[in-house]
Image: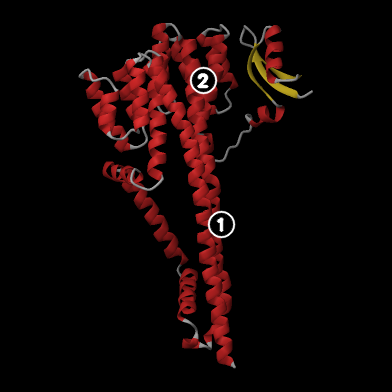
Amino acid sequence: MPEFAYKATDRMGKIVEGQMEAAEERDVVGKLQSLGYIPIKVGHPSKTRSFSLDIDIGAFFRRISSADVMTFTQQLSTLISAGLPLDKSLSIVAELTEKEDFKKIISDVLSSIQEGIAFADALAKHPRVFSKLYVNMVRAGEAGGVLELILERLVSFLEESQELKETVTSAMIYPALLTGFCVVIIVVFLTVIIPMFSTMFEDAGENVPASAQFLMGVSAFMKGYWWVILGVIGGTYFGIKRYIATEKGRLNWDGLKLKLFMIKTLVQKIEVARFSRTLGTLLRSGVPILQSLNIVKETIGNLIIARSLVGIHEGIKEGEGISKPLKGANTFPSLAIHMITVGEETGRLDEMLIKVADTYDKDVRNAVKRFISILEPLLIMTMAIVVGSIVITMILAIISVNDISF
C-alpha cells in the first residue's frame, strides 16, 4: 500500500504533518477529517518534499510566481471552506509558505485585516503579486458574502491559466534545445574542425575551391573577432527588446505576430481563451461588465487585440451588448463570437464565456502540437543541410588539393 505525506491543521490552527499508508489520496483526506484535522496538502513523500527545496540562486528563483499565488489561494480556500476565520487562515498559510518574501506579504495582508482594512484592499497593496482581477474578484466576494465560493473560482481560474501556460512553455523546450544544439555544432565546426584543415590548404593557395576559402575566412573571423560577434548579437537583442518596450515598438511587434503564418492563429487563440476565461470568471463573481472589461484589457498580452476592446466598452455603454462590438473589432474568430452571442441571448453569458475559454484552450494545445510537429523536422533538416554543406565543402576541398599534389 502506498505511503502519503500530509500537512494538516486543527481547529486551533496548529499545523501537523506526517505520513500515512492508504490506497488513495482521498482516503488520507477522509482519515484526517475523521480525526478532526483540516487537510492542507496530501501527496507522495517525494512530491511533498519537493515543495520545501530552498534554492537560493539569486532573485530570479526567489521571485513570487503565479504558481505560488495559486498554491496560496488553494490553501486559503481549503481553510476557509473548513470554517476557519480569515485571519486564522492567513496566519496558517503564512506559516506554511516557504518563500520569505511571500511570507512577509501574507503577514502584511494579515496585519492590515487585523487593523480593520478589507481583505481586497489589503491585497491591492501588493499589485505585483495580486492582479487587479484577483483583487476585484475578492472584493466582489466580500461584498456578496461569498468569499469562500470566489476563492474556489479563483483556484479554478489560476489552475486553468497555469496549465495553458505550462503547455505552451513545455512544448517549446525541445525546439529551443534543438536550436541551441544546432548552433553549438556549427560553432564547433567553424572554430575547431575547419582550422585543423587550414594548414593543409595553405600551400594550395588559390587552387582551393572558393567555397572552402569562404568557410576558412568565416572560421578565421570567428576565432579572431568572437567578441565582436557576441557584441553584435547582444546589442541587437537588447536593442530589439528596448524598441519593443516602447509603445510604437510593442504595437509593431504585436501586429507582426498577427500576420505571421501559424503564429497568427496561435496568438489569436491564446488571447481569445484568456479574454473569455477572465471575463467569464469576473462576471460569474458579480463584477460589473464595464469594470470587468477594463480589467480584462490589462490582462490581454497582445496590444492590438487589447486596443480593440475599447470599442467593445463603448458599444456596451450604448446598449449594443458585447457580441456586436466584438464582431466589429475583427480580432475574434467567428466561432467565439457566435458562442458569445448565444450566451448573451440566453442570459448565460458568463457560462458561455467559460465554454469559449475551454474550447480555445483545447485548440491552443492542438495548435501548439501541430506547430511543434512542423518546427522539429524543419530544424533537423536545417541543421542537416548546414552541417552537411560544411562537410561536403571540406571533403571537396581535400580531394581538390590531393588532385593538385599528384
Amino acid type assigned to the residue bearing label 1 in the image: Phe
Precedes in sequence: disc 1 or disc 2: 2
How far apart are the alpha carbons under marks 1 and 2? 40 Å
Residue 73 bears which disc, if any? 2
Residue 276 image-quadrant placement: top left
Q: Residues within 10 Å of mark 2 (few under 14, many from 20)?
A: many
Question: Foreground: 43 or 356?
Answer: 356
Looking at the picture, how far across and down is residue 33, in whole percent? Answer: 67, 9
Looking at the picture, how far across and down is residue 239, in whole percent? Answer: 35, 52
Residue 121, visible in the rendered structure:
no
Amino acid type assigned to the residue bearing label 2 in the image: Thr
Q: Tell me if residue 335 comes above or below residue 187 in the rendering.
A: above
- Please report the residue visible at 25 percent of the width from the left and 31 percent of the height from the top: 328
Looking at the picture, how far across and down is residue 91, in whole percent? Answer: 55, 14
Looking at the picture, how far across and down is residue 284, in whole percent? Answer: 40, 15
User: Outermost residue, right direction?
Assistant: 1
- Please report the residue visible at 65 percent of the width from the left and 15 percent of the height from the top: 8
Which structural element holds mark 1? helix
Which structural element holds mark 2? helix
Residue hosting label 1: 181
Residue 113, visible in the rendered structure:
yes
